[in-house]
């Protein structure tokens, strides 16, 4: 490819990385807020949080992007740029999936830990911040890692808005060169490299968080065999 076409691909990579970063932040915020609310003692709060989760898990991310970009702006009299429309649609959609991860991890914490916090007269917020989250967050990292990779692949959907992400840029290069196999192979490799780096980063974060709560894997110490066949 010529330098101009490579520059187009690099711009697409940068746009994809930005979209991934912003939508991941929004999805993480939504995940923790909705996930915690799904464990609330009031049934109406649990119901509303569960309703949000089911709505966004049960709708297409592609249709949600169309809705946010084409339907939502006229209703409020303003227009979202593609970057923020994609961020909003992807963040809210994948945040619904992430809320189930948070809810499940909080529910998996030993009930005795919760009872200990109550015995110490901790408020619900103190129990959440000092007892539940420190133990639950390390267990959330592996499923969140998978969700982050899924979000990366979901960023390709924003190309339907004409946004110059990696998928859209790759398609322009394909049209310019009239060649598909090589271009789409490059795209697959680029997505794979980004996903691989994300999983390595998340695995390092998991080890660090587990070490903070005393769950880091310990090395197995091998005891040498006695010499001479002793018992």
Image (spheres, rainbow, N blue to C red):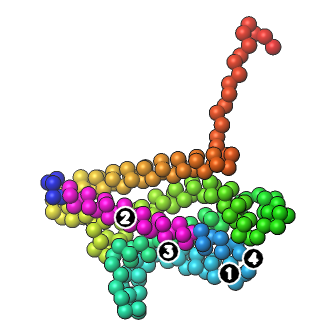
Q: Where are the magenta residues, as a range?
A: 6-31
Label number found at residue 41: 4
Give the secondary structure at mark 2: helix
Q: Are marks 1 and 4 in contact (CB under 8 Å)?
A: no
| C-alpha gap between disc 3 and disc 2 | 17 Å
Give the secondary structure at mark 3: helix
| Of the image marks 2 and 1, the number of the one nearer the N terminus | 2
Please tell me which residue is depicted at 85% across the width and 64% down the height of the picture.
119
Secondary structure that dominates the magenta span? helix
Q: Are marks 2 and 1 in contact (CB under 8 Å)?
A: no
Whole-percent x, y for residue 225 in the image: 71, 16
Whole-percent x, y for residue 3 in the image: 15, 54
* Residue 134 falls in image quadrant: bottom right
| C-alpha gap between disc 4 and disc 2 | 37 Å
Does the rendering let one see residue 170? no
Q: Is residue 60 magenta?
A: no
Does the rendering let one see residue 194? yes
Label number found at residue 92: 3
| C-alpha gap between disc 2 and disc 1 | 33 Å
| C-alpha gap between disc 4 and disc 3 | 24 Å
Whole-percent x, y for residue 104 in the image: 66, 64
* Residue 181 falls in image quadrant: bottom left
**Residue to which mark 1 is pinned:** 45
Give the secondary structure at mark 4: loop
**Residue to which mark 2 is pinned:** 18
| Of the image marks 1 and 3, the number of the one nearer the N terminus | 1
């Amino acid at each position: 490819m010529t330098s101009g076409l490579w520059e187009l691909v690099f711009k697409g990579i940068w746009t994809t990385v930005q979209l991934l970063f912003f939508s991941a932040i929004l999805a993480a915020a939504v995940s923790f807020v909705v996930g915690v609310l799904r464990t609330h003692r009031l049934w109406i709060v649990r119901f509303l949080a569960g309703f949000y989760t089911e709505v966004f898990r049960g709708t297409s991310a592609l249709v949600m992007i169309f809705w946010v970009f084409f339907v939502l702006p006229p209703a409020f009299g303003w227009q979202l740029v593609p970057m923020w429309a994609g961020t909003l649609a992807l963040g809210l959609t994948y945040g619904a999936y992430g809320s189930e991860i948070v809810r499940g991890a909080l529910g998996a914490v030993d009930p005795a830990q919760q009872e200990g916090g109550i015995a110490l007269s901790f408020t619900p917020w103190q129990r959440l911040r000092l007892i539940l989250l420190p133990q639950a967050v390390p267990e959330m990292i592996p499923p969140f890692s998978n969700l982050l990779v899924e979000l990366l692949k979901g960023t390709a959907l924003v190309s339907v808005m004409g946004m110059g992400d990696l998928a859209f840029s790759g398609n322009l290069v394909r049209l310019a060169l009239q060649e598909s196999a090589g271009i789409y192979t490059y795209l697959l490799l680029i997505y794979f490299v980004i996903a691989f780096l994300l999983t390595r980063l998340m695995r390092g974060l998991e080890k660090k968080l587990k070490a903070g709560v005393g769950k880091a894997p310990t090395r197995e110490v091998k005891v040498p065999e006695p010499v001479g066949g002793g018992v």
